[in-house]
Image (cartoon, rainbow, N blue to C red):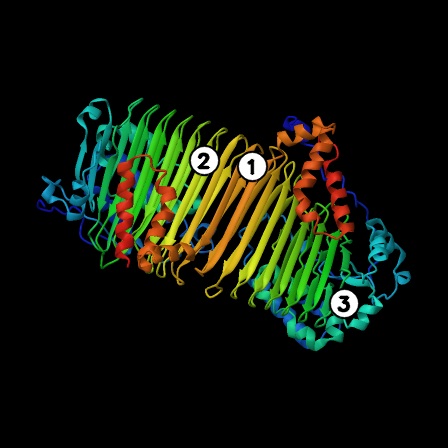
């Protein structure tokens, strides 16, 4: 192991997506938040009356809730400087050819068309605040799968939409869920019919473009009884000089015997505040998995959660965080056991480099009556420099004696023995270091689809470049 | 008991500066203590009351705590003249055949008895009530009393404890003196509705070695009493300090114990809390590893029943490199009792080569019992080994079955398994006499609860 001086340079410093598309939005609201703005958004989207009322009520809730007194530093976040709504196009595109050239270029550089070609899946690509491009494979339409933008979901399936919308994450849940509820725009609406298995993952790739553009995407996913699917969301954003803000809400219902996996790879640029509420309601014998990767942003506060409300429900959360210089990844997971024989597992891996700080924050709650619940939580943290920081804050609240709950965490630096061994086999120090870090995140990488695993490994390599003397 | 001269006005209100001032003057204390009280009172008024919005008080609501609802415990002019003057439960503890290097007995606000092995006194060991020390060794108080680094969340109660100080002792052990036997302090409270605020100040100079026991006793009290307790331990270079707090108050008591231990270079610290009594017992235990190469071990056992609330908060504060700390807290909960464990390992920047571990295990014996565990890590150095673990579980049915198949009733079998569960911690106590004292107290508690 070299002395610490030599590993100071692993930086996310050169941001690889540092480009800005010359965008021409058709409608751009004023900066800042107001009741007027909420009315404008609702009118623009031509929403039913109940949604406007919902938004206005949520806005009140947002104003009435105090700022969280825990987690990351939000003191430099100025909501008055943020655009809450932006609409680049006024209609949905059906085919790739119709997508405007400059937007395409942005996607091109992100490798989106490739994903489109390779995966042959429906791409709900979110550019700015709306779905600009949305294709759905024909056979899925035949299977009855709904994969729409959230706005179309509300328009085309008003009853199904209203039945589930905001039932899993109500606006009162937290301050930023309330904000999202007031100004939400964009996101996906997905419904997998009973018994249908979707073999190829559904993907939504989106990015925030306009400077200081808040993005408040809202996704609602309904997995009917016995269905199976995998949804992938990846995001990345160009670098800007002032802060940006993203606050999404993801709601998922996993009904009896259904299986669902939600994968996110978040690589926002390093000036982004990323405050997301992700929650799944897991019913009898159903299975929910969150795979959550957080690489970018200035501050991320995101704790995917599974509410296990049916007997034998199972929830799993795999979380990986990478905090480079100046970044704070405040991530983790929540599992709530509210029915008998429910099981859950949380595995969290974090890497802190330079002045980066990664925090695991999690909850394991077992309600009275959730007999024979089992939960296991494991957190590992890797520290690369003496200026890096890691924290672990698990909450374990157990009201039921017939349950078995465990939590374990460990913190370490890259082992000198491991490095020595690899270097004695002829690897350079940098290669050895990269290999150890890659090995560390292996359990998460192997759960990703191939393209994403490759991308993740490429990112890690990029991060580790020039990391050693 | 000798004739009681009540110095404190009965039910003296402590609501305003004026009556506090009268109270301070009535105690006729050295100025050193009186000025600390005034500072404490000013802090009490300035600090915000903890609410459940504060992370450290999330599970314990004390927002209704009103010191005016209690009267300071009475202080009599006289000490006990013979053993017969002491309360029965205190005599019982004294009668148990154990060797002690020194004994301290406080009954409500009165120090009834202090005795130190004359040989040790000759070698410079000081063991005396705080107000006495203020006269005889003011330099010790000046240097050490209320000098610990108290966390923001603890300041409100620490301030009240300082202002309302009613008894306690100073133990000062000079360089290279090793006490052959434990120093045993007994505190007995039987004034219902009283406020007792007792302090233990323990100083081990370099190379000194001590074992110190604080035991808290009371009958069941019919009006709620408040016990505020501060412990400060200072271990200099190479010192060895073993500290045990054994709390088995009766019901009707709210007990808040704030313990701060500070370690010098290469010193060894062992802090053991046994929590059995009181309606609500909260212990904030902090080990400040200030000296390189120092070592801290924190242990705790608790057994809750009926509607008891136990709340243990710990801090392993690694401020120096090459230090090591370990923590093992185990609790068993019966009835509708609740417990909270919140432990933090904090490794400061520069505290390289730290080894820090933390384990909390909870056993739920009834379906109405609840346990919360929050093992936390905050690490700002990279060359460290840290881990923590927490579990919540139940008594193993197969083990129960085995014991019952051997003819034990279910409660008997459960009791044995609880003792077995505690044994992992008990076996870490090096002194057999101390270990036996703890085991007796636990067996009594478990036995009575059935």
Q: Which residue appears at 33% of the width and 51% of the height?
A: B416
Residue labelled with disc 3 = A147
Mark 1 and mark 2, same subunit?
yes
Front: mark 3 or 1: 3
Dot 3, crowdedness within 10 Å: few (<14), some or many (≥20)? many
Q: Indicate which disc residue B66 carries.
A: none
Residue labelled with disc 1 = B380
Q: Are marks 1 and 2 in contact (CB under 8 Å)?
A: no
Q: CA distance from mark 3 to mark 2?
A: 54 Å
Using the image, name the chain to which the residue with label 1 belongs: B
| x and y, in percent, of residue B56 in the image | 45, 50
Residue nearest the observer in this picture, A219 or A408: A408
User: Could you say whether the residue bearing mark 2 is in a helix, strand or loop?
Assistant: strand
Residue labelled with disc 2 = B325
Q: CA distance from mark 1 to mark 2?
A: 16 Å
User: Could you say whether the residue bearing mark 1 is in a helix, strand or loop?
Assistant: loop
Residue B434 higher or lower than A269, as above or below: above
User: Could you say whether the residue bearing mark 3 is in a helix, strand or loop?
Assistant: strand
Q: CA distance from mark 3 to mark 1?
A: 45 Å
Residue A439 higher or lower than A75, as above or below: above
First in sequence, mark 1 or 2: give its number. Answer: 2
Tell me if residue A362 can be seen: yes
């Amino acid at each position: 192991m070299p002395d610490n001086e030599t590993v100071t340079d692993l930086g996310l410093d050169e941001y690889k997506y540092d480009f800005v598309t010359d965008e021409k939005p058709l409608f751009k609201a004023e900066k800042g938040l107001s009741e007027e703005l909420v009315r404008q958004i609702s009118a623009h989207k031509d929403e039913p009356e109940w949604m406007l009322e919902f938004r206005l009520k949520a806005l009140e809730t947002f104003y009435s809730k105090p700022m969280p007194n825990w987690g990351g530093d939000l003191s430099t976040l100025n909501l008055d400087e943020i655009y809450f709504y932006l609409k680049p196009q006024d209609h949905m595109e059906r085919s790739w050819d119709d997508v405007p050239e400059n937007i395409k270029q942005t996607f091109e550089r992100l490798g989106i068309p490739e994903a489109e070609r390779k995966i042959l899946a429906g791409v709900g690509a979110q550019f700015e605040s709306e779905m600009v491009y949305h294709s759905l494979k024909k056979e899925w339409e035949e299977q009855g799968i709904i994969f729409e933008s959230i706005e179309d979901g509300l328009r085309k399936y008003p009853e199904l939409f209203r039945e589930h919308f905001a039932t899993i994450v109500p606006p009162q849940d937290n301050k930023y869920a309330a904000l999202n509820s007031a100004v939400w725009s964009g996101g996906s609406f997905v419904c997998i019919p009973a018994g249908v298995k979707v073999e190829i993952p559904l993907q939504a790739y989106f990015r925030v473009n306009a400077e200081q553009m808040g993005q408040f995407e809202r996704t609602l996913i309904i997995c009917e009884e016995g269905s199976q699917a995998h949804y992938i969301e990846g995001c990345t954003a160009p670098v800007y000089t002032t802060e940006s803000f993203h606050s999404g809400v993801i709601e998922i219902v996993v009904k009896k015997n259904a299986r669902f996996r939600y994968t996110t790879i978040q690589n926002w640029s390093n000036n982004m505040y990323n405050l997301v509420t992700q929650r799944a309601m897991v019913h009898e014998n159903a299975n929910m998995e969150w795979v959550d990767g957080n690489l970018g942003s200035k501050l991320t506060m995101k704790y995917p959660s599974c509410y296990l409300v049916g007997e034998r429900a199972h929830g799993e959360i795999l979380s990986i965080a990478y905090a480079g210089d100046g970044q704070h990844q405040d991530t983790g997971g929540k599992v709530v056991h509210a029915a008998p024989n429910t099981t859950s597992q949380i595995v969290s891996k974090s890497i802190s480099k330079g002045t980066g700080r990664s925090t695991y924050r999690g909850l394991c709650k077992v309600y009275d009556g959730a007999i024979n619940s089992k939960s296991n939580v494991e957190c590992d943290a890797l520290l690369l420099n003496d200026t890096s920081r890691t924290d672990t804050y698990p909450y374990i609240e157990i009201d039921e004696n017939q349950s078995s709950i465990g939590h374990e965490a460990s913190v370490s630096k890259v082992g000198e023995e491991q490095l020595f061994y690899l270097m004695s086999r002829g690897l350079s120090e940098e290669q050895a270091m990269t290999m150890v870090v890659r090995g560390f995140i292996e359990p998460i990488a192997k759960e990703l689809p191939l393209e994403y695993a490759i991308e993740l490994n490429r990112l890690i390599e990029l991060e580790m470049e020039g990391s050693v003397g | 008991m000798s004739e009681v001269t009540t110095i404190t006005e009965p039910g003296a209100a402590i609501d305003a500066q004026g009556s506090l001032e009268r109270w301070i003057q009535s105690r006729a204390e050295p100025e050193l203590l009186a000025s600390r009280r005034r500072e404490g009172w000013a802090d009490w008024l300035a600090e915000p009351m903890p609410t459940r919005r504060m992370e450290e008080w999330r599970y314990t609501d004390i927002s209704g705590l009103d010191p005016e609802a209690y009267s300071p415990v009475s202080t009599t002019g006289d000490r006990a003249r013979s053993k017969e003057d002491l309360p029965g439960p205190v005599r019982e503890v004294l009668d148990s055949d154990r060797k002690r290097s020194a004994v301290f007995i406080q009954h409500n606000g009165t120090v009834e008895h202090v005795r130190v092995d004359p040989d040790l006194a000759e070698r410079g060991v000081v063991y005396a009530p705080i107000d006495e020390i203020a006269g005889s060794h003011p330099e010790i108080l000046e240097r050490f009393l209320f000098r610990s680094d108290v966390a923001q969340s603890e300041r409100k109660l620490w301030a009240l404890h300082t202002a309302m100080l009613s008894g306690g002792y100073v133990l000062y052990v000079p360089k290279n003196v090793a006490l052959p036997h434990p120093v045993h302090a007994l505190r007995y409270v039987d004034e219902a509705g009283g406020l007792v605020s007792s302090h233990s100040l323990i100083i081990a100079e370099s190379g000194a070695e001590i074992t110190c026991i604080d035991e808290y006793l009371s009958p069941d009290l019919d009006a709620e009493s408040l016990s505020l307790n501060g412990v400060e331990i200072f271990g200099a270079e190479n010192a060895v300090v073993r500290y045990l707090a054994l709390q088995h108050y009766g019901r009707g008591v709210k007990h808040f114990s704030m313990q701060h231990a500070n370690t010098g270079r290469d010193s060894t610290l062992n802090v053991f809390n046994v929590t059995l009594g009181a309606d609500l017992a909260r212990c904030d235990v902090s080990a400040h590893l200030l000296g390189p190469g120092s070592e801290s071990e924190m242990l705790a056992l608790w057994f809750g029943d009926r509607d008891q609330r136990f709340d243990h908060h710990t801090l392993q504060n690694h401020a120096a490199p090459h230090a090591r700390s370990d923590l093992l807290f185990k609790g068993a909960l019966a009835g509708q009792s609740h417990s909270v464990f919140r432990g933090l390992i904090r490794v400061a920047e520069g505290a390289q080569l730290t080894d820090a571990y933390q384990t909390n295990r909870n056993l739920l014996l009834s379906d109405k019992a609840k346990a919360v565990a929050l093992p936390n890590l905050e690490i700002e150095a990279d060359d460290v080994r840290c881990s923590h673990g927490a579990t919540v579980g139940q008594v193993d049915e197969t083990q129960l079955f085995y014991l019952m198949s051997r003819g034990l009733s279910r409660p008997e079998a459960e009791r044995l398994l609880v003792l077995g569960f505690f044994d992992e911690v008990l076996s870490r106590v090096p002194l057999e006499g101390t270990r036996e004292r703890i085991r007796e107290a636990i067996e009594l508690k478990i036995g009575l609860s059935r």
